[in-house]
Image (spheres, coloured by chain):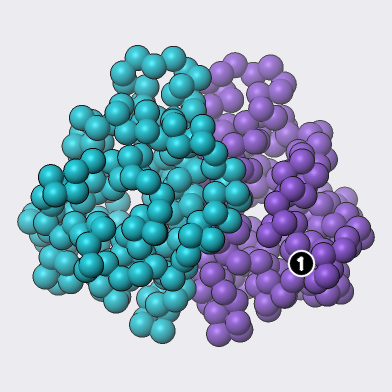
Chain colours: A purple, B cyan
Amino acid sequence: MNRSAIDIPGYTYGTTEVAPSPATLADLEQLKTSVRFTQEDEHFLQLAGTVLDDQVEAIVNHWRSQIIAGIPHLAKHSRHQDGSPLPDYLARSNLRFQQWIRDTCQRPYDQDWLNYQHEIALRHTPVKKNQTDGVVSTPHVPYSDIVAFLAVLNETIRPYLAAKGHDESDVAGMHSAWCKSAHMQMALWAKTYMATQSAGATP
Amino acid sequence: MNRSAIDIPGYTYGTTEVAPSPATLADLEQLKTSVRFTQEDEHFLQLAGTVLDDQVEAIVNHWRSQIIAGIPHLAKHSRHQDGSPLPDYLARSNLRFQQWIRDTCQRPYDQDWLNYQHEIALRHTPVKKNQTDGVVSTPHVPYSDIVAFLAVLNETIRPYLAAKGHDESDVAGMHSAWCKSAHMQMALWAKTYMATQSAGATP
């Protein structure tokens, strides 16, 4: 993945604009141990990356238009506070959402990755919500909304993992690796939420 | 399920010893919407309850003896602070862990269920860790340890769901419902952790 080739508004992965994560590489090793993330999972995530690469737009449209749009308490987080649409915000956020799928599969899980997990979480808390795109939307996304909706992401990604004709054991392997990564990310985002609670985030 | 028939040390589900959850039934409905938990999932959880009922001891032994025991940063939470075993604590905790599987599948998700989710989370924070069994172990379990290890619970429960000969679509349905419940529970536990942060819990 060529960083300089990724031109997405507000996407700052690996740049000096991203603050250091409170989580260390030692924390990451513990998380990998806790979810039992192995080299086989790394292999399957890379495979998932090739399978999903040309599907990320369809996947995010599925999540946003077919699911989130029908759930007012989730949809409001990318709308004006009066509930009216913010199409530019949604469009930019969708591009970053697409890139998040790629990053989950293709990036090495190193300090840059940890730092960007912290950045992603901060952008859902009162510390940085809305700032990247200069909008006035909900002041933050409750952590519980994120954890709950991850169940839907994990479930609905599976048919896309199977869409390129891989056999069932490979699809199961890709899906298992994806879910382990999701749990590591939820754990990392929780660290950020808990560290910023004094800033007014609510669970 | 006959409450009076459940005689497990420290198991207080549905009793006046359990404090009210900060989460309301309205919060629960939002969580169900976010994870897309439907009547079909309720049906599949009930089915999972019948499938798992006589396997809970084997499942918890698998989790504790074959997995957690080999991960020092998780195993320490049910040991003395010097790392030596606390066999009585582990035994009681295992019985409650077994009952948690049953409760996840068979209990109605109502205010009693919400309250006990709060109680379960409190027992992992500095507010109530060790109190139920009167032991001196780690002062709390970091929330990130719980979220990370849930990935393992979700993955390893699947063969047990398949162990009674149900067809693949029923097993997939049971597993999906289980995972949705796990995400709702992680969301509820996070509320408790974040509400108790002033008590010294760390993420």
Viewer-nearest residue: A85 or A120 = A85
Which residue occupies the foreground of this view, B165 or A95? B165
Figure quadrant of the C terminus of chain B = bottom left
Q: For the view shown, which residue lies furthest in the right direction?
A: A88
From the viewer's perspective, is A77 left or right of B126? right
Above or below for B15 versus B2? below
Crowding near the residue tagged with mark 1, few <14, some 14–19, many ≥20 C-alpha atoms within 10 Å: few
The x, y position of residue B108, in whole percent, is 37, 46
Q: Residue at coordinates 50% horizontally, 19% vertically from top-left?
A: B169
- Let me know if residue B141 appears in the view: no
Q: Is residue B159 left or right of residue B86?
A: right
Instruction: Say which residue appears at 42% left-offset and 79% top-offset.
Output: B197
Residue B47 appearing in the image: yes
Q: Is residue B68 above or below residue B197?
A: above
All told, the count of numbered labels is 1
Query: Which amino acid type is shown beneath numbered disc 1?
Result: Thr
Q: Position of residue B156 (x, y in %)?
A: 37, 35
Residue A20 left/right relative to B101: right
Q: Secondary structure at mark 1?
A: loop
Residue under the image location 20 percent in, 33 percent down: B58
- Give x and y (percent) for residue A129: 73, 72
Q: Quadrant of the N terminus of chain B?
A: top left
Query: Given the image, what chain letter belongs to the residue carrying mark 1?
Result: A
Q: Residue furthest left?
A: B88
Question: Disc 1 designates what residue?
Answer: A15
Residue B124 is left or right of residue B130, and the answer is right
Image quadrant in which you'd find residue A201: bottom right
Above or below, B41 relative to B113: above
